């Protein structure tokens, strides 16, 4: 994996967490809603996902501010079918990033996979782009 | 194509038309006067201003800073009154700026005080940067000018190492762009300082010349509208994303292209931000 | 209010506080619908100038073999300016939003409205 570029490693990482976590889609997006990397099954729209995720993050940031809370570590949407969207906003250097995955049902664990992914994204960033 | 000289100077119009190897007619209206330039297969062939024709007309109008232009391709010159190649004409124009010398029947200029001097200053600046930093096609009549720039030529050897560094950075960057097609570091005169492409059939020089025109027009437009300071410009086409980002100082820009289907915007913008910083640091001072 | 004006109003509502200006412009540079919340921003001037940008972008893309242009996005320190060809390319639609806007969302909404805008243009 060390032979790959930083961008390729990010794409590969997201493929791995999809496989590990059973996620149909995962995206790494900037705060402007443009995807930096993604891994998606057929029929999923990573660009739309990225745009929506950034929108969600922005709304959550305003909520936190209004309530006097610290920044959100995780934001989740659940639908009536039990599928849910998990957004993990975080900072690397001066860049605001969001890792978002769709978890197929409530029974699926996701926290460990997303924690590991955030750590790995920081490592890749530091190795290639710091 | 029509436009305003405030958005694109005459020297730039000449350069881009010739680099494109066009046959064309360029009409320029300025303060009640109209000059017409004719291009044939990428060289200036004929110029008319009132009763004057030939090369001196070009040197006069190179100083026009405001006015409107209309460029029509496919119009052949009615005659040939200019034999010097286009880059020689622009170099001679810059030399005249340096020497404060004008054609026989032109108004003498006072350097830096004449309002039309700004157009020539832009031309001179453009050409001196090119002489200092980049290789370009010098015709026989440019060798005199080259002798006067001996110091620049000696310095040029040092530039080889810098150029190699730029190439290395672009090559590394190409690996980071998802759906990568091509990238180039380009001066605002449209000449590549360094370029890299995965498509051997592509002509990086021709591409940069076209895109430079676009970036300069966008920059001028943004400034006129008071919309702030431009950071980047992205064109999405049916087959590609084309991103252009200025380096600090806005004398150079980084151009990148990625495949529309396999590339993605966030990656392209992120990599452009990261690598313009690196390229700026690697530029010779 | 024409149908086009109504659609543009709806679109403005979707963008909320990030919206600055929008215009639907013929390639002659004349705006046929739109408006701005900034009294210092001349929509007419912007429309004319950006029609030149779009023409040049289309020409440049054709010359370098990159195909037809869909849109052009300019980022400045103050705003995003998005100009998008609509329909058969005889019109373009410009949208100016603040830098606070979520760009991906704005692009998504523009894409959703583009066909409606085109159909509403009187022909």
Image (tube, coloured by chain):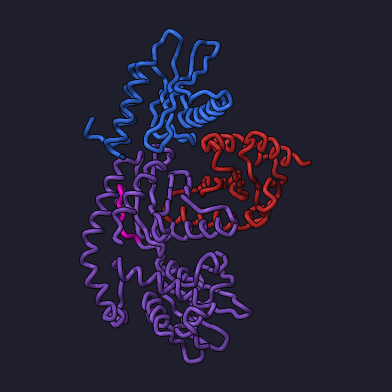
Chain colours: A blue, B purple, C red
Instruction: Tell me the quarter of the picture where residue B16 sits.
Output: bottom left
Residue in front for this viewpoint, A62 or A69: A69
Residue in front for this viewpoint, B272 or C6: B272
Point out residue B87 in the picture as x, y percentages from the top left corner: 37, 74
Left or right: A51, with B32 as reference point: left
Residue at x 58% of width, y 43% of height: C98
* In the image, residue A103 lies in the stretch drawn in magenta: no
Which residue sits furthest top?
A107
Instruction: Tell me the quarter of the picture where residue B28 sits.
Output: bottom right
- In the rendered view, tell whether residue B85 sits above or below residue A64: below
- Main SS of residues in magenta: strand
Residue at x 40% of width, y 61% of height: B251
* In the image, residue B196 lies in the stretch drawn in magenta: yes
Number of marks in picture: 0
Which residue sits furthest bottom?
B104
Which residue sits furthest front?
A68
Highlighted range, magenta: B192-198
Point out residue C75 in the picture as x, y percentages from the top left corner: 50, 47
Left or right: C2, with B279 as reference point: right
Residue at x 49% of width, y 74% of height: B119
Point out residue C92 in the picture as x, y percentages from the top left corner: 61, 48
Point out residue B164 in the picture as x, y percentages from the top left corner: 23, 56
Left or right: B77, with B68 as reference point: left
- In the rendered view, tell whether residue A107 sits above or below residue B5: above
- In the rendered view, tell whether residue B97 sits above or below residue C93: below
């Amino acid at each position: 994996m060390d032979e790959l570029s930083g961008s390729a490693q990010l794409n590969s990482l997201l493929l791995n967490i999809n496989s590990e976590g059973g996620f149909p889609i995962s995206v790494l997006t900037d705060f402007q809603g443009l995807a930096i990397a993604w891994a998606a099954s057929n029929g999923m729209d990573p660009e739309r996902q990225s745009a929506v995720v950034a929108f969600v993050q922005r709304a959550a940031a305003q909520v936190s501010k209004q309530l006097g809370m610290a920044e959100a570590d995780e934001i989740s949407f659940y639908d009536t079918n039990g599928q849910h969207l998990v957004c993990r906003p975080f900072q690397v250097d001066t860049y605001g990033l969001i890792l978002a995955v769709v978890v197929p049902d409530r029974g699926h664990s996701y926290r460990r996979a997303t924690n590991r992914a955030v750590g790995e994204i920081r490592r890749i960033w530091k190795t290639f782009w710091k | 194509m029509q436009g305003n000289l405030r958005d694109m100077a005459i020297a730039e119009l000449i350069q881009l038309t010739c680099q494109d190897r066009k046959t064309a007619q360029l009409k320029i209206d300025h303060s009640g006067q109209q000059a017409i330039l004719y291009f044939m297969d990428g060289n200036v062939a004929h110029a008319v201003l009132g009763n004057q024709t030939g090369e001196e007309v070009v040197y006069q109008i190179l100083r026009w800073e405001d006015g409107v232009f209309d460029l029509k391709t496919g119009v052949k010159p009615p005659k040939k009154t200019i034999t010097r190649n286009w880059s020689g004409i622009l170099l001679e124009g810059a030399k005249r700026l340096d020497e404060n010398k004008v054609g026989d029947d032109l108004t003498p200029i006072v350097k830096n005080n004449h309002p039309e001097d700004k157009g020539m200053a832009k031309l001179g600046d453009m050409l001196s940067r090119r002489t200092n930093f980049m290789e370009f096609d010098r015709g026989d009549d440019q060798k005199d000018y080259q002798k006067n720039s001996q110091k620049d030529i000696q310095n040029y050897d040092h530039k080889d190492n810098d150029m190699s560094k730029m190439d290395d950075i672009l090559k590394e960057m190409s690996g980071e762009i998802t759906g990568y097609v091509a990238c180039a570091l380009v001066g605002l005169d449209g000449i590549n300082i360094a370029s890299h492409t995965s498509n051997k059939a592509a002509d990086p020089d021709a591409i940069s010349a076209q895109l430079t025109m676009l970036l300069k027009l966008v920059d001028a437009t943004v400034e006129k509208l008071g919309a702030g300071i431009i950071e980047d410009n992205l064109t999405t086409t049916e087959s590609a994303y084309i991103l252009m980002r200025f380096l600090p100082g806005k004398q150079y820009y980084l151009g990148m292209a990625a495949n529309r289907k396999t590339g993605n915007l966030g990656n392209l913008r992120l990599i452009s931000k990261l690598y313009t910083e690196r390229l700026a640091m690697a530029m010779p001072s | 209010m024409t149908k086009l004006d109504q659609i543009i109003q709806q679109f403005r509502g979707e963008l909320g506080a990030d919206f600055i200006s929008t215009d639907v412009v013929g390639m002659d540079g004349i705006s046929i619908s739109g408006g701005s919340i900034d009294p210092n921003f001349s929509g007419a001037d912007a429309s004319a100038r950006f029609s030149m940008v779009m023409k040049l972008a289309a020409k440049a893309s054709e010359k370098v073999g990159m195909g037809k242009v869909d849109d052009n996005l300019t980022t400045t320190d103050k705003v995003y300016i998005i100009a998008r060809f609509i329909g058969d390319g005889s019109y373009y639609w410009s949208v100016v939003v603040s830098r606070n806007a979520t760009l991906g969302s704005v692009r998504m909404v523009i894409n959703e409205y583009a066909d409606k805008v085109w159909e509403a243009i009187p022909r």
